[in-house]
Image (cartoon, rainbow, N blue to C red):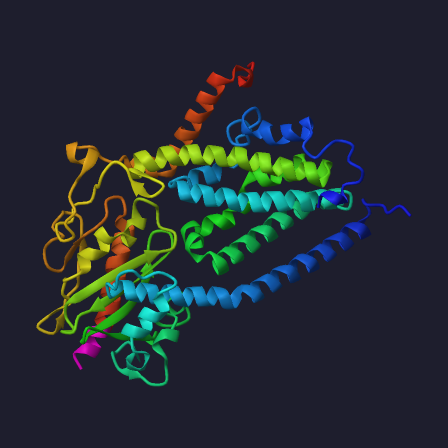
Amino acid sequence: MAINKDSNGYTFLFAIIMVIVVGSGLAAASYGLKPLQDKNLEVKKKMDILGALKIENVDRTTAEGLYAQYVNDADCIVLDSEGNIKEGLVAFDVDIKKQFRDKKLAPEDRDFPLYVASIDGSTKYVIPVVGSGLWGPIWGYLAIDEDKSSIYGAKFDHKTETPGLGAEIKQPFFYNQYTKESITVDGQYKKIKVVKDGSGGDDFKVDGITGGTITSKGVEEMVDRTIQVYVKYFNK
Amino acid sequence: MSEKIKAPKEPLFSKKNKRLVTEPLDDNNPVTLQVLGICSALAITVSIEQALIMTGAVFFVLGLGNVIISLLRNAIPSRIRIIVQLVVVAALVIIVNEVLKAYMPGPAEKLSVFVGLIITNCIIMGRFEAFAMANKPWPSFLDAVGNTLGYGMVLVIVSVIREIFGSGKFFGFPILGNNIVDPEANLELTGLYSIGYMNNNFIILAPFALFAVALVIWVQRARNKSLIEEH
């Protein structure tokens, strides 16, 4: 029996079968791989937090153990935009990237998780930050020292910034500039500026990246916006 | 796969089949002669590692896609054949992306959006339409092997040039010395950088890839005069 392959009926039938087969195949793949992908994201988050805490030799296999060793989940808290503790939330489960993307959620309604770590008996506070670069989201973690005023370590990452330019924010030469910067003067918040004139060695100043101005300014903005909230908490 | 071909009179690696693999390497290179797949040649040739992972991903999509299209070639209604091809590419690329994210999170992070951009790689649609629609699965698979190798070869050549002169590295290892000054970490300029050499930032940017591809085309045509067009 010959089928007329140019008939409308055959064309529609082919298209419908194709869509059903491909659609269910992709849904199965996505559903089946989801737990593994989520697990990878979780490990990546722990690696980033450990990176800001300047723990060395962290890779995907050791991240879980090291995280459990240094960060005590029970001490971690979630703040509101006024720096008050929000009860009933788990810091690690708060997705600040999603909240940042959510246009319906007012900035003052966002949650602000605070991770509390202990390194050799000294308490460190890890603040997650998220903002916008030139092409897409940028994010990072800032570890604040026990004095609640100086930065102990920082780590930034990005999704789609230009390689060699904006993407350099994930390089140590950039994020290490934040180490030992202060966030407060006599308890009052003071902004850390990203500058172009090469005076980044001064206090409250960090050198931007040549050719990556918008990304550098994005880092400045997200650090500035986020740290203010935590300073309110630290001052309580 | 191969047993599905009915009574192949020619051996699996006949002269004709071998030509399918070797021709795209030089005489009919998809990038330098057909000028396809240029987008990814611009985007991911900043480092050799990325170029190789991209080539692997393209191989998976093109190899499997060519075979699928070839098996379906007599069933696909000709009026919607481009859409069918597009669906096959898109589905395979999404699978690659999901699998990379689940099992190889490191490389997946590095390639990020560029895996998705394999969909827009004209080589794939081009091979589906020009070859797999008219040939049996085994030759189609060999065609995919040849074209991926031809594509990957150009990517690697371009990325070697860009990584060495743009970042001073080869496969991620600094070969021209250290170019970051950081007194705290005891880092100072070494190697070529200590005598005033600097990485060329332009080479990192996408437009340079066009110059690099042009250089490859120039060298190739100087070597192989039969490729020079008459007009």
Q: Residue furthest bottom?
A: A87
Q: Quadrant of residue A95?
A: bottom left
Q: Position of residue A145 (x, y in %)?
A: 17, 70
Q: In screen coordinates, is A37 left or right of A58?
A: right
Q: Is residue B105 magenta?
A: no
Q: Position of residue B115 (x, y in %)?
A: 49, 49
Q: Residue furthest left?
A: A186
Q: Is residue A79 visible?
A: no
Q: Position of residue A172 (x, y in %)?
A: 24, 53
The structure residue drawn at horizontal position 91% and vertical position 48%, both measured from the top left corner, is A1
Q: Is residue A232 magenta?
A: yes
Q: Nearer the viewer, residue A114 or B22?
A: B22
A3 over A203 or under it: above or below: above
Q: Give the main secondary structure, helix, strand or loop, of the magenta stretch.
A: helix
The structure residue drawn at horizontal position 16% and vertical position 74%, both measured from the top left corner, is A146
Q: Quadrant of residue A148?
A: bottom left
Please provide the residue range marked out in magenta: A230-236
Q: Nearer the viewer, residue B12 or B168?
A: B12
Q: Nearer the viewer, residue A185 or B182?
A: B182
Q: Residue furthest right?
A: A1
The structure residue drawn at horizontal position 34% and vertical position 75%, both measured from the top left corner, is A111
Q: Is residue B178 visible?
A: yes
The structure residue drawn at horizontal position 67% and vertical position 32%, both measured from the top left corner, is B13
Pick the quarter of the image with the C terminus of chain A. bottom left
Q: Position of residue A35 (x, y in %)?
A: 51, 68
Q: How many marks?
A: 0
Q: Quadrant of residue B26?
A: top right
Q: In screen coordinates, is A49 left or right of A8?
A: left
